[in-house]
Image (cartoon, helix red, strand yellow):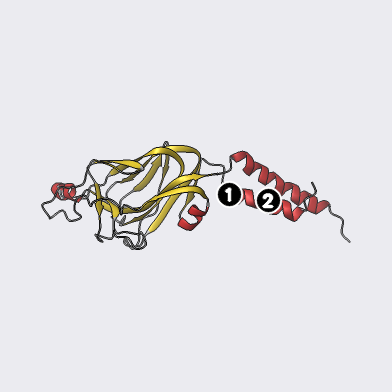
Amino acid sequence: MNIKPRSWIALALLYAGMAGNAQAFTVFTDRALFEAALLTSTTEDFESYATVGTPDPLLNIPDGLAALDLNDFSLTATPNAIKIWDAFHSGSHNTTPGGTQFLYLDTDNLGIANGNSVGSTTVFSLYNPVDAFGFDYTGVFEPGTGFTVSIGSDVFNPGLNNPEDVPLFWGVIGLGTFSTVTLATSLDSGYGVDEVTFGSAVPLPPALWLFGSGMMALAGSAARRKPRC
């Protein structure tokens, strides 16, 4: 097989672009790029469920839930924070085109009772393993808060919303499958999550990244040996 140096470079760059790096996960902050890398996917937009809880802690309505089973995953929160709501509240809102509802992770009632903001830890337990998981989020803006996403022993730090009502996207594709994803805020008492997308992709293993790097080196060597006319 005779491949010109430029072709080797293009092939190597293709491998580099797909593999990203040789770490366990490739992180995405652009939804379009994330979805383009997926073979199959499901998106939970929270539109098909009854609303749960209230976004206003001053109303005498029960606070968020500790657990909730949905179509493709279950949720557990500590402290109770799980709500499904259908209206803009404190920067958090729906991001589904044409939709109204979103997952609102809110501990405001507890926070008011304690006189301060109380964050939450929410675990997504997927019924089937995936190697890709991403979501839109709004309202993570409490000064001094930490916001983390954990998958196994890997901990990530998505950025905060600034302004708080401007949606951001965060997602990962892994080199192996996983079934649980944990979102946590240290201080922010309420934020929105929507358009949770998960499924399968074909991330290339580190060996192919090394292969691509090797091809780039070979291409450079071949180009240097080529006689000038």
Left/right placement of residue 136 relative to residue 176 reads left
Location of the C terminus (image quadrant): bottom right
Q: What residue is disc 1 on?
A: 18
| Count of picture labels | 2
Residue 145, given in percent of the width and then of the height, sits at 30, 51
Q: Earlier in the sequence, mark 2 or mark 1?
A: 2
160 relative to 212 in the view: left or right: left
Name the residue furthest left.
60
Q: Of residues 1 and 160, which is closer to you in this image?
A: 1
Asked whether the viewer can see residue 143, the reply is no
Percent x, y of residue 223? 79, 53
Outermost front residue: 48
Secondary structure state at the residue bearing disc 1: helix
How far is disc 2 from disc 1 in space, using C-alphas? 11 Å
Up the image or down, 182 lies above or below 36; here it is above
Q: Closest to the observer: 6 or 143?
A: 6
Numbered badge on residue 11:
2
Placement of 15 over or under 179, stated as above or below? below
Q: In the visual, does 139 lie left or right of 210? A: left
Query: 85 or 226, which is in the foreground?
Result: 85
Tell me where residue 81 appears, x and y as whole percent: 24, 46
Asked which quadrant contains residue 73, the reply is top left
The quadrant holding residue 180 is top left
Residue drawn where x is 30% and y is 57% of the image: 139
Q: Are marks 2 and 1 in contact (CB under 8 Å)?
A: no
Q: Amino acid at mark 2?
A: Leu
Q: Callout 2: 10 Å neighbours few (<14), some, many (20+)?
A: some
User: Residue at the spot x=15%, y=47% of the render?
Assistant: 62
Residue type at the position of mark 1:
Met
Furthest residue in direction right, as rendered? 229
* Residue 223 in view of the camera: yes
x, y percent for residue 216: 70, 49
